[in-house]
Structures are given as structure tokens and as C-alpha cells.
Amino acid sequence: MSGNERELAEAQQEHWQQTYGEHPGMYGEEPSAPAVHAAAAFRAVGAREVLELGAGHGRDALYFARAGFTVLATDFSPVGLKQLREAAVAEDIADRVTTAVHDVREPLPLPDASVDAVFAHMLLCMALSTEEIHALVAEVRRVLRPGGSFVYTVRHTGDAHYGAGTEHGDDIWEHGGFAVHFFDRDLVDSLADGWNLEEVHPFEEGGLPRRLWRVTQTLTTAGTT
């Protein structure tokens, strides 16, 4: 990681910490639409254990737990994960939810072939370089069991904020304090190399609205990239 990349990463972590602290439960209690889709996709492949990357304060992790999955929720914000744990206790599902503070620029804290499914809502399109995104997907492949499912969402280059705000290079633009790596279709396809790409579904979310893709891909063979 270059000095500029490290500076941006640290600034974004501090920004998210402050945001979760000032706006507890900022995304509400209802699950995201991609999480509802993912739960159905995970059931279809017989998944029981779900790893969520970038879980934040936990609306989707809690939904997976209520749906009967065992969940490991990771995020680089201890503030968000504290809110998640408190909500899990309040809902009496704490036995189904484990949290871990983790920066996805580092290897995932899990053994090879140890989870059934992985979910990431707008995590891959944070302030990550293309190289870091590829390394993360390789880690997802490593920790998934054969036949496992990976569902992720990303903002794409058709989004209204693409090209707006502060440019950081590598299709990363910062607007309102939030840095986003906007995906083109070539990047989605390259991340699916060696996977079974089930779906690239366009959808909109929020008041702008944000324009995203929901990607579902499954691991059909054992081994790492």
C-alpha cells in the first residue's frame, strides 16, 4: 500500500468510526434488499455459516441470524460492531452472532474452506484499490467451502456520484467524506474468473438514488486462486 493509499484508508476508517458514533443504527433495523436475496441464495446451496464483510452496525448480520444462520460479522469499525453486539443481545440471538474487528486489506482471520457463504453489501466498493479488491476476493475464495456462495454489491460507473467530488485515482471518488471505488463491468467479470457467475443484477438504493450491481457467484471447485 502506498503512502497516499494508507492515508486515505486511515481517514476513511476514522470517518466511519465518527459516523457510527454520531448516528447509531444509521441504516435502520430492516435488512437490505440484497441481504434478503442472499439469504435465499445461501439456503439454496445448503449454507449454515455466513461471513459478512463490512457488517457495520449489523442490520444484515442480525437478519441472517434471525433466519437461522450462524454469522461471523466483521468490520473495521469497533463502534459499529459494538452496536451490533448490543442489538444481538437485545434480540436474544447473541449465540448466533460473532464479531471481529478486521480490515479487509489484511488476510481474513479464518482457515481455508471454513465457511459456507460470504456476503458484502457495498464493502468491495469502499476505498480499496483494484489490486486490493482482487486480493480480497482471493481470500473469499480461500475461506469458502466448495460449492459456497458469495453475494456482494457495488456501486458502478453509471452512478450519479461517479466522477464527482475528489478524485483519488483507480476509479475512486470521494463525495461527502465517503470514498467509493466505482466498478465497471470488466472488473466484475475479472473477479468472477474461476467462479460460476450466477447473476449481475442492477438495482437502485437510497434517495440519490445510488446505482449498484448485486453479484452472485459460487465456488465450484476446491482450492485457492
Image (cartoon, rainbow, N blue to C red):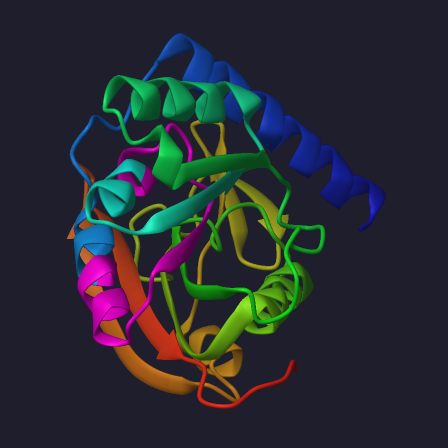
The outermost residue toward the top is 22
The verdict on residue 50 being magenta is: yes
The image position of residue 183, as x and y in percent, is: 44, 64
Residue 155: tell me if it is visible.
no
Q: Is residue 132 above or below residue 70?
A: below
Direction from residue 29 to residue 47 in the image, left or right: right
Percent across and percent down for residue 224 are 65, 80
Residue, far right: 3
Residue under the image location 22 percent in, 58 percent down: 39
Is 184 placed above or below 133 here? below
Q: Is residue 79 positioned above or below 167 on the image?
A: above
Which residue is found at the position 38% from the left and 34% from the top? 95
> Is residue 157 depicted above or below 218 in this figure?
above
Q: Give the range drawn in magenta.
A: 38-61
How many badges with numbers are in the image? 0
Q: Can residue 60 be seen in this view?
A: yes
In the rendered view of the protein, which quadrant contains the C terminus? bottom right
Residue at 27% from the left image edge and 34% from the top image edge: 59
Q: x, y (%) of residue 138?
A: 62, 71
In this rendering, position of residue 161 left or right of residue 64:
right
The answer to which of 186 and 41 lies nearer the viewer is 41
Residue at the image position 61 percent from the left and 22 percent from the top: 14
Q: In this orientation, which residue lies closer to the viewer: 45 or 187? A: 45
Return the x and y of residue 209 as percentages of the image width and height. Answer: 19, 44
**Would you identify the image quadrant in which residue 213 lies?**
bottom left
Is residue 165 a member of the stretch shown in magenta? Answer: no
In which quadrant of the rendered view does residue 139 lie?
bottom right
